[in-house]
Amino acid sequence: MKKMIIILFISTAVFAQTKSIEDSLITTGIREIYSIKFEEAFSTFDKLRKVAPHNPAGKFFDAMVTWWQILLDLNNTRFDQLFYDKLQAVIEQCDSVLEKDENNYDALFYKGGALGFRGRLLSVRREWVKAALDGKDALPIVGKIAEEYPENKDIKLGLGIYNYYAAVIPEKFPFVKPLMYLFPPGNKELGLSQLKIVASEGHYAKYETRYFLLMIYFDFEKDNDEAMKYCKMLLNDFPENPKFENFLARIYFRTRRFNKADSVFKVIYKKIEKGKRGYNLQLKRSTLYYLADINARKQKNNKAVEQFKKSLKISEKIDGEHDSGFKVNTALYLGIIYTRLRNYKKAAEYYKKVLEMDEYNGSHKKAEKKLSALKVKK
């Protein structure tokens, strides 16, 4: 009996130590992801897979590194298939565990997460039906965990995302409404409340939830104060994350604090020029665009022209078969500034460029109107 107690004690101690190592590796790796230290994060999660091969966490968080590689340049699809493959590997490992133990917490948690993130990228790619099917599979898993492990705050991320977006997305994209008959109704306020709990009390999902809230308040709610709150929280922990830094500058720009926006965009541009990790060509294009816009507002026309032209050149390089809003608006602004400078020939040249580009937010009508006005001035 005494030997049995000793063996039980040692087994429990080893298990606790292993779980502590797993937790430490996950926490370290998560911070490396948001610090854009992708190579380090891959290495950390590789260690996790070796320490705990039974735990799907290693494969899941390895996929999250790839997710953030995608997030830094959503127009680039080169990591998409790799991400889908990694998530499928997570799902298969979880299914293998669940065949033996249908209530295994780790397997349920990471399978729900894998389905959720796959659906998230599918929705970004406008693959609405596939995204809805993943959501349909993930929702009961998330609900089961929430019911059986109510003390776990991280699971509220999935619930909060569902409740918020199920209420908001059909209004923003009406063609999605027929798909929503497959699901229970959403609740925007409940979703926000659940997300805020994870943002303050979550363990692994705290930072991702803060990022979600930043995007929600910036893009959907148009609440600049709340967006700024979560942006500053994230930047306080991850000052070298270009995504968060760019949001800060854009919030300043949107709220017409142009001097502050100018300062942050200049810091971002310096980091781009130094080749800092994550500060890519996509960010360079948008940063030049906003700096040019600010200079145009300050009547620094020559500087604005220089920056808009650099931004346009990048757009011509990175835009695919469809012209981006950045590209169209840049050409339109160049026409406006050249009109201001009374260089009507150059102005007409850029207005005609706009007419050759894809229509964006009434751009053709605006360019035609500007061209007609030029004829009067001539």
Image: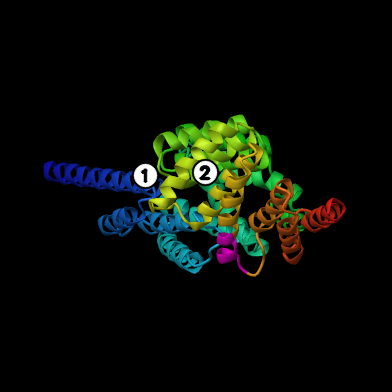
Q: Residue at x 63, y 61 (%)?
A: 133
Mark 2 closeness class: few <14, some 14–19, many ≥20 residues within 10 Å? many
Q: Which residue is mark 2?
A: 246
Disc 2 marks which amino acid?
Asn
**Residue 173: where, in percent of width, then height?**
74, 53
The prevailing secondary structure element of the residues shown in magenta is: helix
Q: Amino acid at mark 1?
A: Arg
Mark 1 packing: few (<14 Cα in 10 Å), some, or many (20+)?
some
Q: Residue at x 56, y 59 (%)?
A: 121
Q: Secondary structure at mark 2?
A: helix
Image coordinates for residue 300, horizontal then vertical, percent:
61, 40
Against 128, residue 366 (above or below) is above
Q: How is the image coloured?
A: rainbow
- The residue labelled by disc 1 is 31
Image quarter of residue 247: top right
Task: Give left or right: position of 218 versus 18.
Answer: right
Residue span colored magenta: 313-320
Task: Tell me, yes or no, whether the highlighted magenta stretch contains residue 319.
Answer: yes
